[in-house]
Image: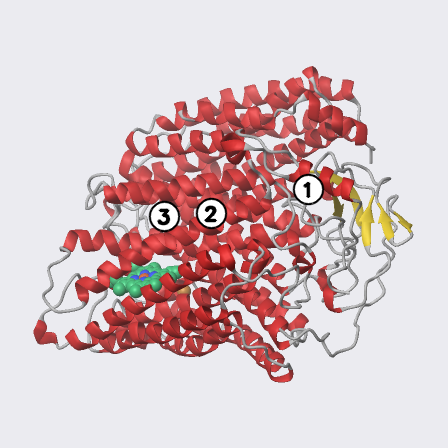
Amino acid sequence: MTDAYVAMPEPAAAQALERTWRDPPGFLGWLAAVNHKSIGRRFIVTAFGFFVAAGLLAAVMRLQLSRPDNHIVGPDLYNRIFTLHGTAMMFLFAVPVMQAMAVYLVPLMIGTRSTAFPRMTAYAYWVYLFGGLMIFIAFLLAMGPDNGWFNYVPLSGPQYSSGKRSDFWAQLITFTEVSGLLVSVDIITTVFKLRAPGMTLARMPLFVWAMLVTAFMIIFAMPAVMLSSTMLIMDRLVGTHFFNPADGGDPLLWQHLFWFFGHPEVYFIFIPALGFMSSIIATFARRPIFGHTAMVLALIATAFFAFGLWVHHMFATNVPDLGKAFFTAMSLMIAIPSAVQIFCWIATLWKGRLYMTSALLFTLGFFFILVIGGLTGLILGSVPLDLQVHDSYFVVAHLHYVLIGGAVFPLFGAWYYWFPKITGRLMDERLGRWNFWLFFIAFNVTFYPMHHLGLEGMPRRVYTYAAATGWGPLNLLASVGAVVIALSVLLFIVNAVKSLRSGELAGPNPWRAPSLEWAADSPPAAYDFAAIPVVASREPLWDARPAPSHVTGLATDVREGVSTTVIDALPDHRYTFPSPTPWTFLAAVATTVMFISSIFTPWAVVWGSIPIIITLIAWFWPTREETAKHLALEKRP
Amino acid sequence: MSATHPPYPLGAAPAPSLETRGAVRAGDALDVRALPSYGFGASSLMWWGTLGVMAIEGTVFAMAAVAYFYLRTQADEWPLGVPPPKLLWGTLNTLILLASAIPNQWAKRAAQRHDLEGVRRALPICIAFAVAFIVVRAFEFTTLECRWDTNAYGSIVWMLLGLHTTHLLTDFADTAVLAVLMFTGPLEGKRFADVAENAVYWDFVVLAWLPIYAVIYWAPRF
Ligand code: HEM
Ligand SMILES: [Cu+2]
């Protein structure tokens, strides 16, 4: 029943759908593409590229730190390297890759053919790509930022950071935030308005919930850092005094605004990972996730608490003590929803029949790592202990346990899991297991010793240390681990390339998974579903087909879908999606020119806006041909 | 992978009737041919998109206002070394903005009625208002009594006013483009929904001004 879930349309109709939904041909067509799968794939590959680039920077750092008094990298270059490593990992890899997975998967999981605003998604992708390239090019030209990934003032302000380094950092934030915010609006609208008929909110997969909650968090958190980076660049370029205490400003304002975003940021990385885990665990335990509703509530609660936590990054500052007590309590509170989710998964795994695959292994690796990461987090979350280990390697260890354990492991699991959907071929399981065990062991070898280094007093962000400190052996161990991590990632790349060419054909649903994306072909046709499915349960592919089982009456010569109501997913109207256009690309180019030029002259904000406005108007302006098609299908509400 | 079907009961709850707004059951399928091809308000995707953008911009305004009060707590006197802004232009502009809600409402109502003539009458009036409040805004900047680089007070009031001014400009540009389109075509029914959503955004820009007005002009007087 699984494979035939979605009724096959007549071959002629399928051909017409394919013609309507595919990307236009040629290089120009490639630039004009708006299909959510094309954009999603590019987004994922690009984010992976930034992960590799930032990982190589980490390798250089570990090489430098592998023995005392090493001089491969000098202090200034080291500053630029850790800054770009941290910045790229957070802003160009971890957050965007999660959104990229959403752009690809959410429409498939909720049974539609596109995200709500595909042109905006394409624009968001280009802006992100150009921003990322800008910062790496600046790095190669020795103009890369060097004040750490949170770019604290006054170090990054006009007095202490001359040249353009800090400005590039501030503009990178603008690029990535524009992109992240637009994708969030797109995801929220998609989830609210484009779910297949019958997919009530209560029946929506946990993965989609996770992406929805994340999108909301981004909308309320990212503006804070956008505002603060704008203030910073204005302090630097036009002489404002937001952070300048001599003229009434305050450096702590930066810290508040940054961490109001920065703490939730960890959760925009972590919550999507929870969504991956729920999909993967349900499939390989062969049973629905235990406590679905509790899981949804826990996701929402985590998001709320995450906003109450920013001050815990500032325990070493002069925030009032009562405030610190409150935030310590909040830091401990957030453990409750996390515990609920972990217990629900354990219950699911316990009661299920496990199929051990690489995807599941990576997911299980999460549990082990998170327990350690979480415990070290509890230490940092309490004020006296935080002061003890503040700015030491303990923090570096903690942050990688949380980020790699909490997000990168589930993400690799997700890649093994959805690779067959995206490419049509399974990844090699044997290589997958090697990949997992190497990564898992090497990860602990790299980062576990850093806890000890921290307690022994090794500060973070130092380019070298004296032999007399006795930190040499543990650092060497950490560096060896880092090399093995690099090998395991290489193995992943080899596996992906090899599987792409000659992996076993997957078929629509190789894992016998329950959610709708597995009803589409692998790789999905340009139109995703030959017919939009109708949904009557949480695990549609595991349950009886509802009656009616699919939608008819949509046009095949226009990109048309069904829009449904927000809560009950009742049919509401037929929605026509926009078609491909090169203007999204050109608008992104114009935006890039404006953002980068404004680093050098504030007037760029004025003249640089003109091409942006022109491209946006051209993007919006409807063509006669399109309008004629729409009129033929029009029915007034 | 094992090919056995999962061993637990079929859980499909009966769907609520999906036959709404003209969707009808046709054998095994749900025929949606008769559904409307666009919608207004919460039914429209664009409306949700606009709401998302408003949430983002509203958060930016709120954060900027918080920054204003934060800087104020750090200062011994406020405003720093300059008198509070004079009320004339800002108050006048508040009145113009509030008044602009009226033609804006005409445009929205006409759009909801699919009344092309009505839309063509209302939008130019909206644009005239937009020109008026942008011009008055220029005078407002002169009443701040300081520059952005005078001190942190100057920086934050310029930023608040500047942020809102950006919205006036985008609102003006959006409305102007839409108005031209409504005169020249190509037109289809969905464009009326665009006009209605543009009106929602306009109301947001007007309403967002009220707290900003209070912060810039009245907070320093208390
Ligand atoms: C893949 C293996 C990785 C290795 C070997 C590695 C290594 C390092 C090292 C050695 C530092 C400390 C620099 C210093 O304080 O002197 C560092 C900092 C950092 N890493 Fe990683 N890292 C890895 C992956 C990641 C990932 C996946 C993320 C995020 C998703 C990440 C985020 C950060 C951040 C935010 C910093 C702080 C940068 C700063 O101090 O401004 N790292 N990493
Ligand atoms: Cu935090």
The amino acid marked with disc number 2 is Pro
The numbered mark at residue A3 is none
Q: Residue B71 bears which disc, if any?
A: 3
Q: Vertical placement of A130 versus B91: above or below?
A: below
Q: Which mark is residue A223?
A: 2
> Residue farthest to the top?
B184
Q: Earlier in the sequence, mark 3 or mark 1?
A: 1
Specify the amino acid type for callout 1. Leu
Q: Which image quadrant shows ligand 1?
A: bottom left
Do marks 3 and 1 share a subunit? yes
Question: Mark 1: few, some, or many residues within 10 Å (few <14, many ≥20)?
Answer: many
Of residues A68 and A441, the one nearer the viewer is: A441
Q: In the drawing, does residue B174 fall left or right of residue A497?
A: right
Q: Which residue is mark 1?
A: B45
Task: Relative to A100, say whether B98 is above or below.
Answer: above
Ligand 1 within 8 A of label 1's CB? no
